[in-house]
Amino acid sequence: MTAGTADRTDGADSARERRREQRGWYFYDFACSVYSTSVLTVFLGPYLTSVAKAAADADGFVRPLGIAVRAGSVFPYAVSASVVLAVLVMPFAGAAADRSGRKKPLLAVSAYLGAAATTGMFLLDGDRYLLGAFLLIVANASLAVSMVLYNAYLPQIAEPHERDAVSSRGWAFGYTSGALVLVLDLVVYSGHESFGLSEGDAVRICLASAGLWWGAFTLVPLRRLRDRRATADGEGAVGSGWRQLLATLKDMRRHPLTLSFLLAYLVYNDGVQTVISQASVYGSEELGLDQTTLITAVLLVQVLAVAGALGMGRLARTHGAKRTVLASLAVWTLILAAGYFLPAGAPVWFYCLAAAIGLVLGGSQALSRSLFSHLVPRGKEAEYFSAYEMSDRGLSWLGPLVFGLAYQLTGSYRDAIISLVIFFVLGFVLLARVPVRRAVAAAGNPVPDRI
């Protein structure tokens, strides 16, 4: 065998192994996205709100630790609290992964802790709103930590020219699983009487089954993904997580364009995550829509999000990822403005809004992730993606907090929803100012032909 033949064989083996890891990587989105759709987006918001209302006094307030909280604000406040916990834990996860090179055991721990908390939501009934809030906090924080480790694999398993497509396929896998499980949830919920179940029992089964799904399909990436030798120096991350985070932020000062992108993403993604988590509460409490309508609307989002993620991935190849994301932010702004004027008791208009969300949701998130992967210096993937994840599922605490406070003060979900427009407008302006090609080169990475 000649040297040239050997090089080609080694290259083919490397490409084959990379594709194998990519296929395994897709399946973590397939596993955990069911939590985001069935639990966070559809069932838990309205159900936890109803449980809190059952525990509320005559004025509609519950009083955890003696603090008066409007029952309708319990869910968004719990989402914000979950972010605080995630912010405390994620620096340790990112530091441990980079210093040890062992992302996979940490991914397993965080994934199965989240899956167990989600499965435990079967116990949420009566007036146990504090139990529901606690399980939500644990599950949401665990998901955030696991996504730090999951996202950090992307620069290692995909070449620069592959990342837009690989990231978009991951989101597409996630939305496919979300749609599949929502169909099953719709069967269980709409036919609960024929199954001998109460409405509450059906909801609790749907919540718990998402945790079982999350745990089962996490086995695939754990078998396919492989750990790499650590490239960072130092001991394990126990006791050094916050020092590592401060070191990461200090290091980012040497890459100010990467930091500028992260700031823009933090702002607009805060709006995206808040819309996702609060949409079902808005539909049920403000628009008076029933649970079946909400399930089918989110199912529509899931189906169209698959097409949207893949379609926006193709647009990015023609127009560049940055321009495509900017266009999606303009659409998000129009969606919120339309949502404010949406008439109550009109499911057709709610479905139209859901369709618009589906078309931009997956693509805007997938392309943001692939854009950031180009801006990360080699050998610092997990710690940089720890900061990124704080923007994605970590530091997205301000939107839910603003949403909850707006409702706490006004009693109107319409006032709460319109407040989110600022996140998309400001995010658009900040992203437009980032020279992405210069940012990629400044991070020491090859600049793709189209970005």
Image (spheres, rainbow, N blue to C red):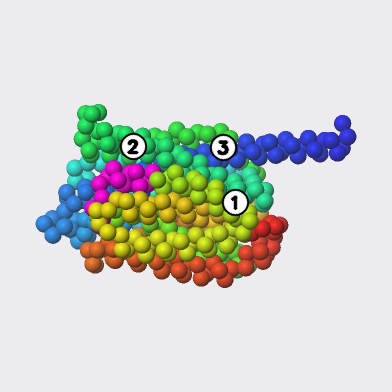
Judge depth for marks 3 and 1 and give the one in front. Answer: 1
Crowdedness near tag 2: few (<14), some (14–19) or many (≥20) residues, C-alpha within 10 Å: many
Pick the quarter of the image with the N terminus: top right
Judge depth for marks 1 and 2 and give the one in front. Answer: 1
Q: Residue at 76% of width from left, 39% of height from top?
A: 11
In the displayed structure image, the side of residue 136 where residue 198 appears, left or right: left
Which contiguous range is marked in magenta? 286-299
**143 or 188, which lies in front?**
188
Q: Residue at 59% of width from left, 68% of height from top?
A: 434
SS type, badge 1: helix
Which SS does the magenta portion mostly show? helix
Crowdedness near tag 1: few (<14), some (14–19) or many (≥20) residues, C-alpha within 10 Å: some
Q: Amino acid at mark 3?
A: Gly
Q: Position of residue 337 (x, y in %)?
A: 37, 65
Q: Which residue is mark 2?
A: 185
Q: Which residue is mark 3?
A: 24
Q: Which residue is mark 1?
A: 314
**Mark 3 or mark 1: whose residue is earlier in sequence:** 3
Relative vertical location of residue 351 with respect to residue 186 in this rendering, above or below: below
Relative vertical location of residue 325 with respect to residue 146 in this rendering, above or below: below
Res 189 quadrant in image: top left
**Mark 1 or mark 2: whose residue is earlier in sequence:** 2
